[in-house]
Structure formats: C-alpha cells, structure tokens
Image (spheres, helix red, strand yellow):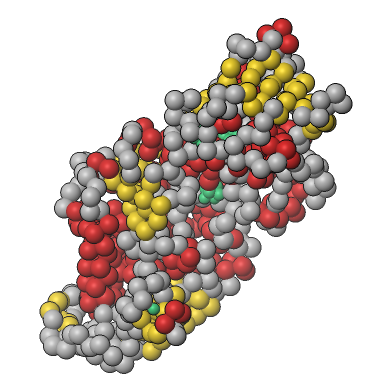
C-alpha cells in the first residue's frame, strides 16, 4: 500500500472539540478499484493504466465509516482519530435538514432526525448516527403530497436556520477534515488535467457546459481555478423543464461571478407541452426533448458564440460512476453530437462522495434541489427520473406536477388508451415506444411506386404539398438547377457536384402532392439503384416529418444546415429548412445519420408501418 501521509498535518477546532489530523492515508487508492484488462487485470490507481496507457475499468468503489467520529471516510483508516473504519457501501451523500424533516414527517415524528447525522447510501438505505437503516421509499410515496407539503410549511423557519448552519455543523466539519488528503489528491489531478487539456486553446475558444447541477458546479469551479480566470464562457442549456431552484441558483451564480459570461441556450421556437400532444411525451427510449431542447439548441449557441473557430473545447461535468451508460465515456472525446467540439471531463472518475467533499470543503453554493433530496438535478419531469424524484416533485412543485399529469392524461386518452389513468399513474408512459395513435405518425410512411414507363423513375405520393423546402432537401445530392428543366412540368435537376452532369430529375409542381424522381445516375455514396432509392426516400421522410427538431443541424460538420420553426399557414407546415450551398460538401451525413433520414421517424414510428 502506498502510504503517503504519516505525520501531523493540521489542527482545527469546532465549538466543542479540537482535532489534530495526523493519520496515515492512502489518498483514496482504496476507494475506487481499477484493473487493466489489457494487462492481465493489473490493479491500477487511476483510470489510465500506467503500463499500457489504455483505459482501465472500475471494479468497485468503497466508502468507509468511522464509528468513533461518526463520519464517512474514503479510507480504511479514519483521517481524524486514526482508528480502523468499516466499509458501509459504494457511495454516499449527505442528507440535508430539509430532507431529514421530510423523512421525519413521513414517519410521523417530524423532528426525529434533525439533530442526527444522516447520510444516504442510495435507494432505500441510509446511515443514521452510524446505524444503517432502510426506509421504504415506495411506501412513503403512497402518502398524500398535499398533507406532507402542509406539514413541511410548519417548520419552514426552523429548517432555514438549520440549513444555513449545515456546512458548519460538527458532522460536516469532521467529514471535510477527515478526508482532506482525498480532496487534495482529486483536486490536484483534476486541475492539472484541465491545464493540459486546454493547451493550445485560448480562453475565448473554451466553455463550461453548465447545467446548474452539482457536477457542473464543481467543473466550473475547477476550471476557473485551474486556469486562473473567471472569464471562461459558461453555456447553460435551458431545456425549459428545469427545476425552479436551478434558475434561482443560476441567478445567484451570476451575481457571485459577475465577470463569468453565462449564456443561456434555450429553444424558444418549440413548446414542450405542445410537442407532447403532437409527438407524445418523452419516454425512456424516446428522449426527443434532449434533441429538441438540448442538442440542437446548444449547437446553435455554440455556432453563434464561437463562429468559425476551428475547434472548441468544452468542459463537461460527466462522471462515469453516475450511470452504466456513462461508464463507457472517454475522458476526452470529439463530440459525436455536436460538431467541432472537443469534450474534456475533469471529474470523470469522481464518486458522489468526492462531489460532496469538494462542494462542502470549498463552501460552494449549489442547487437547493439537493437539499430536498433529489439525487439528480436535470429536467424535473424526465422519464428517467426515479419514482422518488417524481414524488418529491408532487410535494415541492405542485403546479408543474399537476400540469404535466394532465398532459399525460390527455395524451393517453387521445391515443385511445382504455386504461389511461392507470397508464399514467403507474408510469407506463415512460416505457412508450413509437407513435401509435398519433396523427403525425402517418407522415413517417413514405409511399412510392416505380414508374410504369421509366424504370429509373419513382412516383412518390406525398403527405403534404410540394414547397420550396423539398428542393432544399436535395442539395446534399448536388447543385439544384431550376433553369434547364421544363418549368411547365415543374422539372428541377440535381447536378452531380463533381461532374456538373444531371444526377436526379425532380418533376412535380409546387402545391402538388405527386413527385416523380428520375435517378439518372446514382448519387455519390450510393452503390446501387436500391441504395439511391433509399437515400431519396430518406429526404422525403424529412420533408414529410420535419418538425424542426434541430437534429439535422447538429450533424452537419460544415455548419451548412439551418432549421427553424416558423409560423404555420396554408402554404407551409411551419418549418424553415435551409442548406448553405457554399458550405455543403455533399458528404450525405445529414441524409444517412438517422434511421430513415429523420430523427422524428424513430419517435413517431408506428407498428406495421412501411419501412423504407
Ligand atoms: S426530460 Fe429527460 S429526456 Fe427530456 S430533455 Fe430533459 S433530460 Fe432529456
Ligand atoms: S428533418 Fe427530422 S431530424 Fe432533421 S430537423 Fe427536421 S425533424 Fe429534426
Ligand atoms: S451534412 Fe452538411 S455538408 Fe454533408 S451533405 Fe448534409 S448539409 Fe451537406
Ligand atoms: Zn494496461
Ligand atoms: Zn475517526
């Protein structure tokens, strides 16, 4: 074992005690166990193997408890009293006075936990003054949120006072003191990573992705300290579904960091409630709102902010231990979702324990939702949120909660669910797939027939009349030429970008629902007539299904696509889709990126629909 601290470090005093920190500590090497699968499961200290340099895998994390000091420790030896600690779980977070009161009320003894040291180990498990206790959150969720809200109100003043003094409470002061060497180790590592990742970038070509959650709060603090500047741009992606406490926190952040530019990326064109009725509420597999309200919007903000800069460095607060899916993320990557963006994740290997150690030791302000017991702060109504999180929202966000419930009920009724109430109340909507019952779904079906007179031609039956946008969607195949064709017949040619020879002929007048496409030569990248037919169908899918979700814009690495929602009228369906011919390099990425051309096809897919 690599013991690196053996003598007295420092002394601190609380109101009742004097502590001397002197014990040996390993710097947290026992907390996360890594092995390198490329080197015969070699045990490693970090997520990078010192022998082969490849990614190691986490074999488990451990948090320990000192029964003498009544605090969580990162090591098998307590940093304060030097006694042996015992393993209590894989991660831990503090329970704040607000959440202690809530549990007390739910158990019928409101103040029972207020003076106790309470920590959450995830799920139903808590450690209260050193004793592990299980609360059945599922049972609690059966209690009437209105009653709970009323009782919480009776203790508002008391809780405010306890909350203000929480960071200075004995338990938290001991926690931060005992784990000081862990904090120093992870802070140093993260800061030197930030300095090395940012080499070659000017502060004006970096940003912090700022969600208002604890991970991005920490990342912001680390980046500003490591680079010694407050001027790094922060981009806050406002999904429009944020907790009110996120906006409050953001307001406080702006006031305390007046020289840090905080830009808000918000899609003001689209309305979440309207879209829920049009394309159905998001579900665990159809998280369309991430595309509409996050990816597309943030891409536009990056475009607008960083203009034509070659590459932009984005600091993210990603943590692998947060979920299985995130476990696969690399620390620095070229973003596949957002073009020209290099992502660096300084706290990728931090545990929740580390987060709280950092926040509390540095006395950072953070989102109040954590005080109420939300373990994650993102969109308050996300289908990925736990049942407990939904229950908390029914208590703390009654107006938003009731409004969303009625959207869910209306949706369930509109798509003909006979058991619509149960479908919503039991959370079955979260497992929804495809767009059965939705009017818009029929647009995802592209229907065409081969032409009887010309075997190179296809006759498409469109679900909406031809408008200018249809021709725009053929720009990825080549140059649009409206001059050489027969205007009376509505003929438009697409010329091969390299040879300038006609590759496609589109015949169909504006306002008509019939479009004939003649494949004169296969578009680049198509290796057969059938493949050409698929590419064309993909663009017709876009024409019929586009609701300006913004996903196309995010996939074009040339920044050539601009999609906006416009006012809907008789001649257009409320979408403006343009492709800048000067920027388009005809790579066809926007055509092939999504299954059948359009991201919405997946969201609206109907069973037994024609797959083209
Ligand atoms: S609700 Fe969930 S799926 Fe939708 S934008 Fe928010 S995080 Fe993404
Ligand atoms: S065509 Fe589809 S994927 Fe592209 S912006 Fe429109 S809805 Fe989104
Ligand atoms: S992804 Fe961009 S560059 Fe490539 S074909 Fe589409 S618009 Fe053109
Ligand atoms: Zn190795
Ligand atoms: Zn101790």
| Position of residue 377 measured from the top left corner of the image (x, y, whole percent) | 45, 54
- What is the residue that sits farthest to the top in this orientation? 488
| Position of residue 497 measured from the top left corner of the image (x, y, whole percent) | 53, 28
**Viewer-proximal residue among 388 and 162:** 388
Residue 488 is drawn in which quadrant? top right
- 345 relative position to 588: left or right: left
Q: Quadrant of ligand 2?
A: top right
Instruction: Determine if residue 12 is in view.
Output: yes
- 196 relative position to 419: left or right: left
**Viewer-proximal residue among 304 and 147:** 304
Residue at (57, 56) in percent of width and height:
384
Instruction: Determine if residue 439 is in view.
Output: no
Residue 47 is drawn in which quadrant? bottom left
Residue at (69, 21) in percent of width and height:
506
Quarter occupied by the N terminus: bottom left
| Position of residue 28 measured from the top left corner of the image (x, y, whole percent) | 30, 79
**Count of marks placed on residues:** 0
Q: Is residue 452 above or below residue 374?
A: above
**Viewer-proximal residue among 260 and 17:** 260
- 498 relative position to 172: left or right: right
Q: Is residue 325 above or below residue 444?
A: below
| Position of residue 367 measured from the top left corner of the image (x, y, whole percent) | 37, 53
Residue at (59, 37) in percent of width and height:
524
Residue at (30, 69) in percent of width and height:
357
- What is the residue that sits farthest to the right in this orientation? 452
- What is the residue that sits farthest to the bottom in this orientation? 84
Quarter occupied by the C terminus: top right
- 169 relative position to 123: left or right: left
**Viewer-proximal residue among 538 and 248:** 538
């Amino acid at each position: 074992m690599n013991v690196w601290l053996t003598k007295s470090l420092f002394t601190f005093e609380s109101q009742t005690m004097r502590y001397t920190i002197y014990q040996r500590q390993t710097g947290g090497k026992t907390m996360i166990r890594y092995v390198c699968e490329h080197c015969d499961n070699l045990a490693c200290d970090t997520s990078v193997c010192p022998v082969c340099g490849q990614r190691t895998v986490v074999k488990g994390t451990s948090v320990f408890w000192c029964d003498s000091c009544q605090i969580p420790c990162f090591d098998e030896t307590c940093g304060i009293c030097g006694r042996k600690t015992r393993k209590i779980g894989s991660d831990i977070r503090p329970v704040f006075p607000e959440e202690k009161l809530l549990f007390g009320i739910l158990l019928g003894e409101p103040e029972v936990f207020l003076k106790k040291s309470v920590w959450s180990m995830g799920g139903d498990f808590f450690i209260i003054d050193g004793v592990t206790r299980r609360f059945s959150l599922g049972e609690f969720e059966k209690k009437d949120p209105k009653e709970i809200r009323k009782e919480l109100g009776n203790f508002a003043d008391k809780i405010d006072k306890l909350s203000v003094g929480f960071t200075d409470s004995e338990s938290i002061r001991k926690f931060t003191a005992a784990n000081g060497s862990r904090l120093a180790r992870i802070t140093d590592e993260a800061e030197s990573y930030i300095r090395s990742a940012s080499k070659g970038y000017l502060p004006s070509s970096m940003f912090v992705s700022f969600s208002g959650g604890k991970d991005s709060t920490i990342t912001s603090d680390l980046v500003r300290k490591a680079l010694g500047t407050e001027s790094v741009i922060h981009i806050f992606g406002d999904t429009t579904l944020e907790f009110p406490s996120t906006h409050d926190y953001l307001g406080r952040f702006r006031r305390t960091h007046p020289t840090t530019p905080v830009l808000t990326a918000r899609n003001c064109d689209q309305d979440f409630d309207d879209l829920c009725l049009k394309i159905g509420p998001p579900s665990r597999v159809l998280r369309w709102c991430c595309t509409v309200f996050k990816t597309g919007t943030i891409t536009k903000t990056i475009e607008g902010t960083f203009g034509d800069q070659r590459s932009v460095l984005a600091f993210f607060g990603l943590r692998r231990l947060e979920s299985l899916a995130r476990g696969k993320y690399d620390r620095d990557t070229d973003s596949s979702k957002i073009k020209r963006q290099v992502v660096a994740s300084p706290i990728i290997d931090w545990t929740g324990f580390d987060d709280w150690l950092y926040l509390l030791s540095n006395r950072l302000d953070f989102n109040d939702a954590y005080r109420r017991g939300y373990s994650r702060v993102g969109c308050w109504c996300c289908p990925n949120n736990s049942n407990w999180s939904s229950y908390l929202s029914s208590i703390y966000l009654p107006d938003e909660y009731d409004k969303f419930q009625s959207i869910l009920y209306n949706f369930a009724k509109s798509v003909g669910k006979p058991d619509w109430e149960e479908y919503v109340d039991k959370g079955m909507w979260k497992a929804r797939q495809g767009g059965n019952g939705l009017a818009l779904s029929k647009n995802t079906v592209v229907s065409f027939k081969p032409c009887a007179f010309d075997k190179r031609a296809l006759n498409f039956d469109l679900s909406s009349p031809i408008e200018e946008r249809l021709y725009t969607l053929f720009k990825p195949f080549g140059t649009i030429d409206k001059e050489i064709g027969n205007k009376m017949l509505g003929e438009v040619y697409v010329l091969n970008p390299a040879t300038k020879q006609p590759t496609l002929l589109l015949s169909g007048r504006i306002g008509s629902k019939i479009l004939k496409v003649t494949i004169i030569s296969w578009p680049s990248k198509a290796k057969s007539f059938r493949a050409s037919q698929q590419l064309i169908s993909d663009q017709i899918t876009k024409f019929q299904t586009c609701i300006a979700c913004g996903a196309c814009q995010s996939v074009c690495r040339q920044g050539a696509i601009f999609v906006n929602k416009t006012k809907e009228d008789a001649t257009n369906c409320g979408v403006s889709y343009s492709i800048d011919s000067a920027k388009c390099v005809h790579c066809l990425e926007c055509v092939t990126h999504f299954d059948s051309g359009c991201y919405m096809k997946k969201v609206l897919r109907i069973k037994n629909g024609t797959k083209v």
